[in-house]
Image (spheres, rainbow, N blue to C red):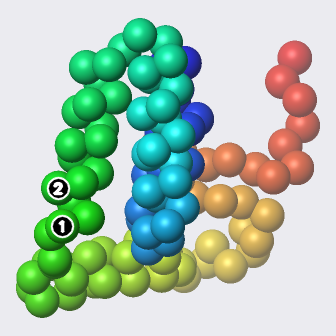
Amino acid sequence: MKHFPQFIHMLRAAWDGDRNTCVEQATHLAERLESEGDTAHARMLRFTLSALQNKEMSPATRQAVADARATMLAPAPTAAGTQDDAGRVALTFGEWEHEAAPHR
């Protein structure tokens, strides 16, 4: 879990389609792993990055990724009668209020 934030930055860059930042983050993470003696994971990361860089997405995969992004980024449909809950964010596991009073 020590490298989790850097892994998330790498994943986010890949998700956003920022190939240069993704490669930069992956390379930096591999270098950190090597400096800590974890050469096996660094090698695995470099191998995976190399394989992904040399692989083109098929048109069907590219369309599926675009559809998934559009679905995830689209505003969620609101049910009738929930328009007055402008300060609330609906989550799959419940709700969270932006200005919630502290629990005591």
Q: Amino acid at mark 2?
A: Ala
- Distance from the alpha carbon under mark 1 to that under mark 2: 5 Å
Residue 19 rendering spot, x and y as whole percentages: 44, 69
| Residue that numbered label 2 is attached to | 51
Q: Which mark is residue 54?
A: 1
Determine whether 40 is above or below 19 in the image. above
Given residues 19 and 14, the one toward you in this image is 19
Left or right: 9, with 100 as reference point = left
Q: Quadrant of the C terminus?
A: top right
Do labels 1 and 2 touch, CB within 8 Å? yes
Is residue 53 rendered to the left or right of residue 60?
right
Residue at x 65%, y 59% (from the top left corner): 89
Residue placed most toward the observer, 24 or 72: 24
Q: Under tag 1, what secondary structure?
A: loop
As drawn, 60 above or below 65: below
Relative depth, front residue between 88 and 50: 50
Residue located at (81% from left, 52% from top): 98
Amino acid type of disc 1?
Asn
Tag 1: Cα neighbours inside 10 Å, few (<14), some, or many (≥20)? few
Q: Percent from the top left, x then y, of residue 47?
A: 21, 43
- Expressed as whole percent of the image width and height from the top left, the position of residue 31 reads 48, 31
Q: Quick one: label 2, few (<14), some, or many (20+) residues within 10 Å?
A: few
Q: What residue sits 63% from the left and 73% below the top? A: 82
